């Protein structure tokens, strides 16, 4: 049982760190420090073609990613201590996967909706 708790705690720590990484990567986007490029940011043809659209779209997407990263990190800790789920490796893994998938889909969808409004 002790090995299982160690594995679940390690999984939680991994997801907390990934959430904090997303937060860290979002900050330069929010601060408009990322110039148009093909590697980092909200890279679709329209933002890449117009610098003002690039900074607006990336600022908005960065704020969403910041919220997602914070929710991701906090959610990993909360889910670890939910009775029954927090002691089941498979249940924790699935719950973390759902949070990530739903969150990323929401960020992408909202970002595209915002881009269409520009």
Image (tube, rainbow, N blue to C red):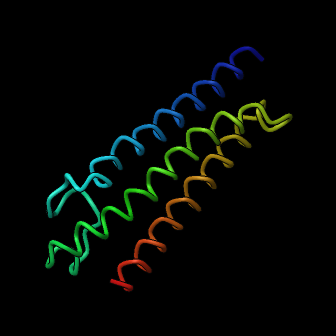
Question: Which quadrant of the rendered structure holds the N terminus?
Answer: top right
- Give the quadrant of residue 84: top right
| Quadrant in which residue 91 is drawn | top right
Left or right: 106 with respect to 87? left
- Does 7 sit above or below residue 36? above
In the displayed structure, does residue 73 sit left or right of residue 17?
right
Expressed as whole percent of the image width and height from the top left, the position of residue 110 reads 48, 73
- Up-down: is 74 above or below 49? above
Viewer-proximal residue among 90 and 47? 47
Depth check: 107 or 118 in front? 118
- Left or right of 79 in this view: 62: left
Is 1 placed left or right of 7 in the picture? right
Residue under the point 44% across and 80% down: 113
- In the picture, the quarter occupied by the C terminus is bottom left
Q: Position of residue 112 (x, y in %)?
A: 40, 77
x%, y% of residue 76? 63, 38
- The residue lying toward the viewer, choosing from 6 and 74, is 74
| Residue at x-position 53% and y-position 34% | 16
Q: Residue at x 46, y 59 (%)?
A: 64
Which residue appears at 80% of the width and 36% of the height?
Answer: 82
């Amino acid at each position: 049982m002790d090995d299982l708790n160690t594995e679940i705690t390690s999984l939680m720590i991994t997801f907390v760190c990934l959430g904090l990484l997303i937060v860290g990567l979002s900050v330069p986007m929010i601060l408009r420090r990322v110039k148009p490029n093909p590697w980092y940011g909200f890279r679709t043809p329209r933002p890449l073609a117009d610098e003002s659209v690039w900074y607006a779209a990336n600022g908005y997407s960065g704020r969403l990613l910041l919220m997602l990263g914070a929710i991701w990190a906090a959610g990993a800790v909360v889910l670890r201590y939910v009775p029954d789920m927090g002691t089941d490796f498979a249940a924790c893994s699935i719950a973390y996967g759902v949070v990530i998938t739903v969150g990323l889909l929401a960020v992408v969808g909202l970002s595209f909706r915002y881009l269409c409004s520009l």
